[in-house]
Every structure is written in structure tokens, then in C-alpha cells.
Amino acid sequence: MTSVLDSILLQNNFSTPEIRLIWSDENKVSKQLAVEVALAKIEGELGIIPKTAAQQIIEKAKVEHLNLLALQKESAQKRHSLIALIHALQELVGTEAGEYVHYGVTTQDIVDTGIMLQTKEAYDVIVQHSKALIQTVAALAQKHRSTLMMGRTHGIHAIPITFGVKLAIWLDELLRNHKRLRQLEFNEVFVGSISGAVGTYAAFDGRGIEVERLTLAELGLVVPNISWQPSRDRFSEFATTLGIYAGTLGKIGHELFTLMKTEINEIHEPFRKGEIGSSTMPQKRNPALIEGVASLTQPIFSDDSVILQSMLIDGERDAIHWRNEWVALPEITSYLDAQLVQLTYILSELEVNTVQMRKNLDIQGSLPYSERIMFKLGKVIGKQTAHELVYQAAMKAIENHDDFISLLYQEPTVSTHFSKETIQSWIVPENNIGENLAKVDDVVSTVQVYFRGD
């Protein structure tokens, strides 16, 4: 094993079968052959190469006709990433047709266009899995729209919220990430390259622009305005878009990790009978799936840095920088898709401990309602005066383990204007969530409308 993506034991924790297949050697070669086939087809139709040669290439250029181990051996001998495939294809089609294999293009054309086909294929899978996750979160937000829980800032109890609003905040962020993904298509990220040695079309005898346009149309890729061999910003845009998405997923994973801690105990990830949390502590039910989701963000961030460095191309082309894409693109797409699929499963089967959420809400008694009490008092005695009175009572209650409302009511300024029963009426949790429910409804509705038109 040289990578977790290659490990039979580990690969499903770090990737999905769909993405692994896309970055397999077989699919890589298949995509490169697809470019050679599309090129030959168009060149044959335009009379640039004989139609009979084009037909031979179209018929024979299939990955199942090739010996990948032989390609590996020749590639190592020639120290060239594509020449072995060109030679193998020439042998497959015969001497006469072989003269027209790879006609007019350079290695970079085939390699770049091939990896862009793989990237687009991975993108399509990720978009579908993103949609599935968003729909899962939307359903969960609706279900827990009114489920009361404690809001926390700086890790400390703040004021009440609902689990639905926490989910809706995630949902809104996930939708933004999905839109960023879709924007990649409008930004013409998925382009091909059929422009020759330094992007001048010099070997096409004045017909290179036409060949490129028709070949890329055949492959379903966008035609670039000009050669992008020394311009790797599109891969960086793709990678950083996935990196932002990974940041959201890592944040959600870490929050779920926190909520599942024994002392908090507000959620539990799905648990299957026979699952083992520890080899030495039989009682453990660890957040293994949640940790898996959260752990994949860091390597994606690191790979984004690698991809960004591929922009530092020397001259019209060099292999020092763009080879970074071969390392990072499979990893980024694999890790992100694993996050999407694993988180979708976790949330679709999530155990929400509503009883514990309410217990946690009540841990500090009436203290979490100090904000509302302050503003209610402030309407009569002034906000700043009310803040000072509430602050003093709250500090005493915390330090002396005393009842906050009783301490507050001991202040003459408070008892003169308000009955204790009135103050008690302000600390009903359901009446202290502001306009949470309306915002949950807004976000869920936005998601539903978006996907109806997607």
C-alpha cells in the first residue's frame, strides 16, 4: 500500500467506489484514448487524415485491447507519460493507419484533455452526492424545526435555539457550496486542449482551431479562447471550490463530534450491532463515522495548496508544476465525495436525543434568559441600568449557586415595577427563540425551490 486510496482495508473511509473508478489507470487510459478517437474522427471527416485510418483508430482504440503492464514498462523505459500509449495504439491499428495516430497534437493536449474528462466525471458524481446531502439536511431541519436546545458561543451556554435552526444554518451554507459547484460549469472550467506543442496549432496546416472546436464538442468539453497549457487556474478554481465545501463539511463533522460527547449527549451517529468502539474498553460507542468526515478536511486543504502551486508554470509548459494535479485532483475529489456520502448517511440515520437537549437547556436554570429579562426590564428602567442589575444578579447566582430570579427580584428597582410572576413568565423556552422558526422555513423553502429548477 502506498496510499490510503489504494488500501483495500482503508479506501472506503477515504473515498467512494465511484470516484476510485474514475481515477483508475483503466479509466485514465480510456479517457486518453477517447481524446485520440475524437481527434481522429474529426480529422477524418475534415480530410486531414484518411477516413480509413480514422475508422481503424476509432474501432481499435479501446482500453480492453491494451496491456497496462506493458504500458507501464515502456513508460518507465522512455520516461514519458504518453509515448507508450501512442506506440500501443499504432500497433493496434497497423502500420498504415498508425501513421495518423496522434496527428498534429502534443502529449500535453491528450494528457490535459484526458484528466479534464476525469475531473468532469468526478465533478458530476460530487454534484449528485451534494444534492443528496442537502435534501437530507433539509428534511432533518424540517423535522426538528421546533426541537429546543441550548445555543452555545465560545463553547459556553448562551440562549435557547432549536436544533432546526442549527441545521438550517448548515443547510444554507451547503446550498451556497452547491451553487459554487454549479458555477464551475458557467465559469468554463471544464475545457479541453487540442492546440499542439506550444498552443499555436502549427502542425494543423491552418485548420487547428477548427479541429479543436469540433473535437472538444465531440468530447463534451468547452473550447478555450486560447491555449491553457501554461494557465492552470481552472484546476485551482475547481480545487479551491471543493476546498471551501470541505471546510463546511469538516465544521459540521466537528460540531456533531462535540454534540455526541458523553457530557453533552445530544446526538448519536448511527450504530450497528457488533460495531466495536475500543479493543480494550468494551462499553465504548465512538463517533467513528463523524470523526471520519471531520478528518478529511485537513488533507483537502493541504492538497489545495499543492494545486495552487501548479499555477507557477515556467514558460509555455513544464512538468515541475502541473504534475501536482496528478497527485492532488484524485485525492481532493475522493476525500470530498467520501465526506458527502458519509455525512448523508450519518444525518439520515442520526439519533437526536431531544430529552437530553432539554435537560442541557435547563442546566443553568433561568440564567440563559437573562438577555430577554434585561430587555424587558430595560423598557421601563433603561437598557444600561437593566444590564447592570441583571449582570450583578447573574454573577451572584453563578458564584453562590443561588437562584437567579430570586436574587434579581431582591433589587428594589426590579420589584417596584414588576411582579415575580411576570419575570417568571419571561423564561419560557419556547418564547425565547426569537424568529428562529420563520428562518428555518425560509431556508428549507429556498432549497426546495432551487432544486425544483435545478
Image (tube, rainbow, N blue to C red):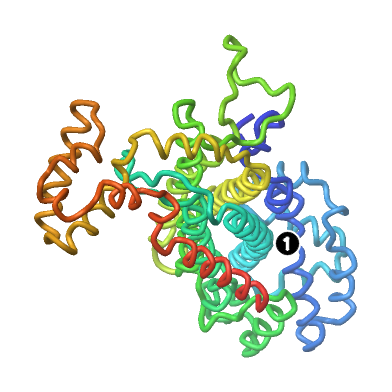
Q: Secondary structure at mark 1?
A: helix
Residue at screen point 76% across, 66% down:
34
Residue 63's x, y, as percent?
82, 55
Residue 170's x, y, as percent?
49, 56
- List the residue tagged with mark 1: 31
Viewer-side residue, 129 vs 56: 129
Tell me if 48 is positioned left or right of 209 in this view: right
Tell me if 96 is positioned left or right of 84 in this view: right
Residue 37's x, y, as percent?
79, 70
Tell me if 284 is positioned left or right of 313 in this view: right
Viewer-side residue, 159 vs 116: 159
Q: Above or below — where is 348 with respect to 39?
A: above
Residue 193 makes an appearance in the image: no
Q: Above or below — where is 274 with respect to 195?
A: above
Residue 319 makes an appearance in the image: yes
Residue at screen point 68% across, 78% down:
216
Q: Above or below — where is 421 with respect to 311?
A: above
The N terminus is located in which quarter?
Answer: top right
Q: How many marks?
A: 1
Viewer-side residue, 196 vs 278: 278
Q: Residues within 10 Å of mark 1 (few under 14, many from 20)?
A: many
Kind of residue at badge 1:
Lys
Residue 404's x, y, as percent?
24, 37
Viewer-side residue, 105 vs 288: 288
Residue 398's image quarter?
top left
Tell me if 273 is positioned left or right of 276 in this view: right
Q: Above or below — where is 158 with respect to 145?
A: above
Residue at the limit of the structure toward the top, as seen here: 280
Residue at screen point 12% across, 59% down:
381
